[in-house]
Image (cartoon, grey):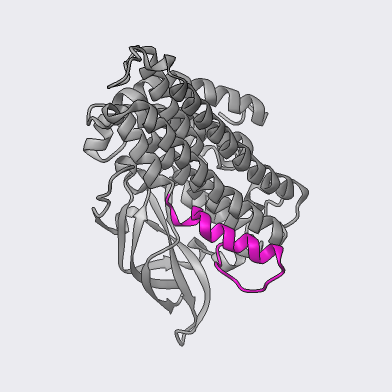
Amino acid sequence: MSDVITSPTETTEMLLEKVRELGPLMRERAADVEKTRRLDDEVVRIIEDAGFWKMWRPRRTGGYELPLHQYAQVINEMARYCPSTAWVTALLNGGDWVTGMFPGAAQDKINAYGEGYACVVFGGTYTSEKVPGGFIVSGKWPYASGSLNSAWAGVAFNVVDDEGTVLDLGLAFIPMTELGYEYTWDVAGMLATGSNTVVADKVFVADDLVVSMGGGLAGNIASEFTDETLYWSSFGVTSTFNVAVPLVGMAQGLYDYVRAGLDRNRAIAYTRYDHAIDSPSVQLNMADAAQLIDTASLHLYQATDVVDKAAAEGRALTYLEKAKARMDLGYVARRTREAAELLLNVSGAGGFASSNPIQRQWRDLEVAGRHGATNYDIGREIYSKALLGLDEQVTSLL
């Protein structure tokens, strides 16, 4: 795989070609995976064989180690066809990205089991106890996207000393076989993402399977492979980027569905337009929607390229750069949802038929676009305070 193809550009073109080949099958199975609430087995097999779930794994351990810009291109192309598949792909790659921050011996240990696929959950309720060689961890972590396809769960917990004093926020990697599971993901969209709740009941986690989130946010990475600059990318911004990145593709997929409907010469009810495409209002809405999607894309790649450039230069982002990127990523969510509203105006009430893929693509975008990390108003708060030199912290995930 990555030992043959070394250029990120070449790798990206190969993966994009495979996505386009797989696209019709993903689109065909999209309604079924919503009913089964898990990804399609045949699609998963093809994705695994092509290495889509190893785009952020180090080349040294069999991955593609793509920079954020090229990675975003692939995720967005996938999201045009099946948002849930793209979301799980992004979140499992996020697990590889976090794994790349561990020392090499721990990376080998994680990758040796279950292909190393890991879902990562930053939120939850939990307790921990320090014991010789590690920690005893209990808790519940909801919204564990990709958990149905994972061998590991990376879960947040408090790193404590022998007296129970909290020293740091950590991320513990636990095999899924040692965790309980609750099917709690009952929402309006993104139903096949497996974003359920993982549960630990006094599970032992060895010290070498714990990484410091506090250290990651401060740019202190445990990996000894300093030339693998991807894993020195800003922890908070890159985590936010990874849940924003599929949104442009989801909006483009919605555009594709609406555009295809116009090609079928649908009339506009209660008007003299026998062909909706002849209506200036339809034409203008389509142009405005396309422009909003383009705007979202520009802001996505603006944030992406800042992170890639800083990582390549071996430097941490400034606070102002991180704040601006956070607002850019919230702007992606806002503009893609605005595009969706215009596209629904064009599709009309028929777009909400349960058999119409337009409503499914819309629901997926609306749910995915409201992830807490891409909250636009919070992004505005963060950026405005940074611009004005105010010290008040709104979030630690930056």
Q: Nearer the viewer, residue 278 or 354?
A: 278
Magenta residues, start to end: 370-398
- On the image, the x and y values in percent for residue 264 come to 34, 12
Answer above or below: position of 329 versus 316. Answer: above
- On the image, the x and y values in percent for residue 45 come to 37, 29
**Residue found at x 45% / y 84%:** 164
Q: If the image is split into quadrants, where does the C terminus sit? A: bottom right
- On the image, the x and y values in percent for residue 236 come to 58, 58
Q: Nearer the viewer, residue 224 or 42?
A: 42
**Residue found at x 30% / y 57%:** 197
Q: Nearer the viewer, residue 14 or 264?
A: 264
- On the image, the x and y values in percent for residue 65 come to 60, 39
In-image side of 228 versus 160 (left or right): right
> Does the magenta portion include 372?
yes
Residue 90 in sight from this viewpoint: yes
In-image side of 397 versus 26 (left or right): right
Answer above or below: position of 388 versus 152. Answer: below
In-image side of 191 versus 328 (left or right): left
Residue 101 in sight from this viewpoint: no
Q: Nearer the viewer, residue 253 or 216?
A: 253
Looking at the image, which residue sits at the far right?
Answer: 313
Q: Choose top left, top right, bottom left or bottom right for residue 59.
A: top right
In-image side of 273 versus 160 (left or right): left
Q: If the image is split into quadrants, where does the N terminus sit? A: top right
> Does the magenta portion include 184?
no
Please count the marks in the image.
Answer: 0
**Residue found at x 31% / y 58%:** 198
Q: Choose top left, top right, bottom left or bottom right for residue 49.
A: top left
Answer above or below: position of 295 versus 180. Answer: above
